[in-house]
Amino acid sequence: MADEMPQIRDSSDIATNLATVRALIAAAAEAKGRPADSVTLIAVSKAQPVAKIDDALDAGHRVFGENRVQEATAKWPEIKARHPDVELHLIGPLQTNKVRDAMALFDVIETVDRAKLARALAAEMVRSNRRVPCYIQVNTGEEAQKSGIGPEEADDFIGLCREEVKLPVAGLMCIPPIGEEPALHFALLREIARRNRIDILSMGMSADFETAIRFGATHVRVGRAVFGARETGAAPASATAL
Ligand SMILES: *Cc1c(COP(=O)(O)O)cnc(C)c1O
């Protein structure tokens, strides 16, 4: 069940939550014979106030995810000025007219899913002389309302991004459909990564990150289990954000 978090209470103590999630990540990794540091925790701070992000930074955390360019642009330049070692991932849909803003702020773009966007990102990398690692988002559930390249088209699209567009394709990302067994989707993403020789797999959220690690996740995107409930009005992971 995608919305249940049986193992973690919704606590406002961010340092405690981070320690709990890190311990669960380490246990899940070690159960598969992998070192704990083979999994990167991306703390998803969308719809969370800067005060909570500061708590996470004080606890030593440095890798964060946001799903809207506009919200991130309001929050993060000031935080990054204080903490230049922060690594910020864009995990929500990206419109081509926001590529320049996104590239100026984010250190990883996880949601490349169409040729027009890939070309816009590549052009901005040339213009700004800055290369930003990109992940390809795969719509493993083939949901009409969700972004991501279809699993059938993924190999061709990855090839296009690498060979023709010259995008630095570093990883794959997916968001399984709500209410479905996520393991099947994680297995599908892992298989697409294997046959395309891609090492990074961004999959798993608060409700299913341990399962994702069992299926080879190298990056888990965890929001509520770290920060507690989001402020109201926040877009769900499946929404087509601006
Ligand atoms: C919001 C979001 C998450 C985190 O979801 P939680 O259930 O709060 O852990 C992960 N990935 C994406 C793409 C999201 O939009």
Image: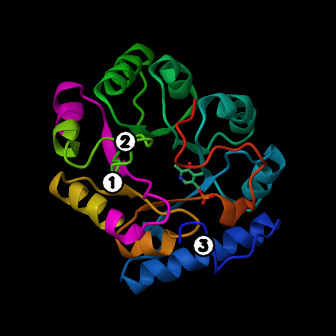
* Circle 2/circle 1 CB separation < 8 Å: yes
Q: Residue furthest top?
A: 127
Mark 1 crowdedness (10 Å alpha carbons): few <14, some 14-19, many ≥20: many
Question: What's the residue at 21%, 34% (across, down)?
Answer: 162
State the image coordinates of residue 9 (x, y, percent, origin top left): 74, 75
Q: Nearer the viewer, residue 211 or 233?
A: 233
* Circle 3/circle 2 CB separation < 8 Å: no
Secondary structure under the numbered disc 2 in the rendered image: loop
Magenta-colored stretch includes residue 209: no
Q: In front: mark 3 or mark 2?
A: 2
Looking at numbered disc 1 in the image, what kind of residue is underneath it?
Thr
Q: Quadrant of residue 41?
A: bottom right
Q: Quadrant of residue 135?
A: top left
State the image coordinates of residue 142 (x, y, percent, origin top left): 33, 49
Q: Nearer the viewer, residue 130 or 218?
A: 218
Judging by the rendered image, the residue that carries numbered circle 3 is 22
In the picture, measured across the screen, residue 8 lies left or right of residue 160, that is right
What is the spatial separation of the Cα atoms under label 2 and label 1, in whole angstroms?
A: 8 Å
Q: Give the residues in magenta.
A: 159-185
Judging by the rendered image, the residue that carries numbered circle 2 is 148
Judging by the rendered image, the residue that carries numbered circle 1 is 140
Looking at numbered disc 3 in the image, what kind of residue is underneath it?
Arg
Q: Quadrant of ligand 1?
A: bottom right
**Looking at the image, residue 175 lies above or below residue 149:** below
